[in-house]
Amino acid sequence: MVKGYDYTWIRLSRKMIGNCSDIIQGMKITVVIPVYNEAKTIQEILRRVQNMDLVHEIVVVDDGSTDGTREILRELDGSGIVRVILHERNLGKGAALVTGFRHATGDIIIIQDADLEYDPREYPNLLAPIREGKADVVYGSRFLGAGRRPILYWNMVANKLLTFVTNLLYNNILSDMETGYKVFRRNVVEDMVIHARRFDFEPEFTAKVLKRKVRIYEVPIDFNPRDYSEGKKIKAWDAVIALWTLIKYRFMD
């Protein structure tokens, strides 16, 4: 057990939704986890993901970590449902995700960050719109009224500005384009060429989903952001790149 982590919620969530394995009947679910220098959190996030019965496969892509993460992952590779892919050098989150998508065998892919900001206990909520036939892509929104740790004001402002630009350019009403919780049917990305290498994955993926008129749905999620002293990696310059990415893909593929 990990101090401060409420395992009771897992049991209650399972009881409320019934058997998690029936959330998406007959479909295999893969969780893709991009990792860079997360030695302090990687074992815990894997434990939390594996606690969710509905997950069939976990693909972890280490993006050239130098803090001992790779050594931990080598020990975990092949244990249970965990598969580990190693980048020889740091290429960026977007590149790690693309690698993960290529190795995923599930019908549905869940993107899971390794930093404990996003809680796997949200999976049933995130998967429900797909199960109900409402969507092919689901975003977990941090701004739809669920609980969140109130820090990093300017990050929130940047997120909301980028989401506003997304809606303006692509005629939509998203509340959280930059969310790390994105869930989708694997066929959504099978023929999608993703050029993003770093945090520009979020705007590029969103732009291409919206341009293709893929059915998208948002659900509220709890969010526990860490600050820069705790290892947060995204920088102010990444917001500028995201803005340019949104504009660029409005007019090209």
Image (spheres, rainbow, N blue to C red):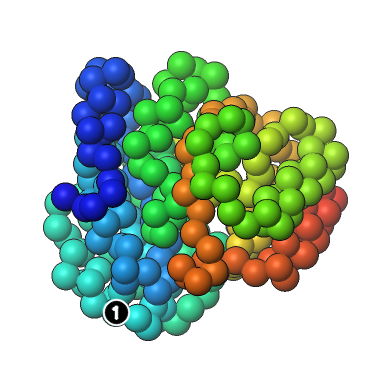
Q: Please say whether residue 190 is visible from this viewpoint.
A: no
Q: Tag 1: Cα neighbours inside 10 Å, few (<14), some, or many (≥20)?
A: few
Expressed as whole percent of the image width and height from the top left, the position of residue 101 reads 44, 53
The residue located at (43%, 27%) in the rendering is: 125
Residue in view at x 23 percent, y 20 percent: 15
- Identify residue type, mark 1: Gly
Residue 229 in sight here: yes
- Please indicate whether residue 163 sits to the left or right of residue 70 in the image: right
Please state the total of marks drawn on the protein image.
1
Residue at image coords 21%, 53%: 2
Image spot of residue 178 (x, y percent):
63, 49
Tell me residue 105's x, y (percent): 33, 46
x, y (%) of residue 109? 42, 42
| Whether residue 134 is situated above or below residue 89 in the rendered picture | above
Identify which residue, 65 or 122, lies in the foreground.
122
Which of the 4 image quarters holds residue 120?
top left
Q: Nearer the viewer, residue 60 or 180?
A: 180
Q: Residue at x 32, y 30 (%)?
A: 27
Q: Is residue 173 above or below residue 150?
A: above
Q: Is residue 155 left or right of residue 227?
A: right
User: Mark 1 highlights which residue?
Assistant: 68
Q: Secondary structure at mark 1?
A: loop
Residue 244 sits in quarter = bottom right
Q: Using the image, determine if residue 110 lies above or below residue 246.
A: above
Residue 158 sits in quarter: bottom right
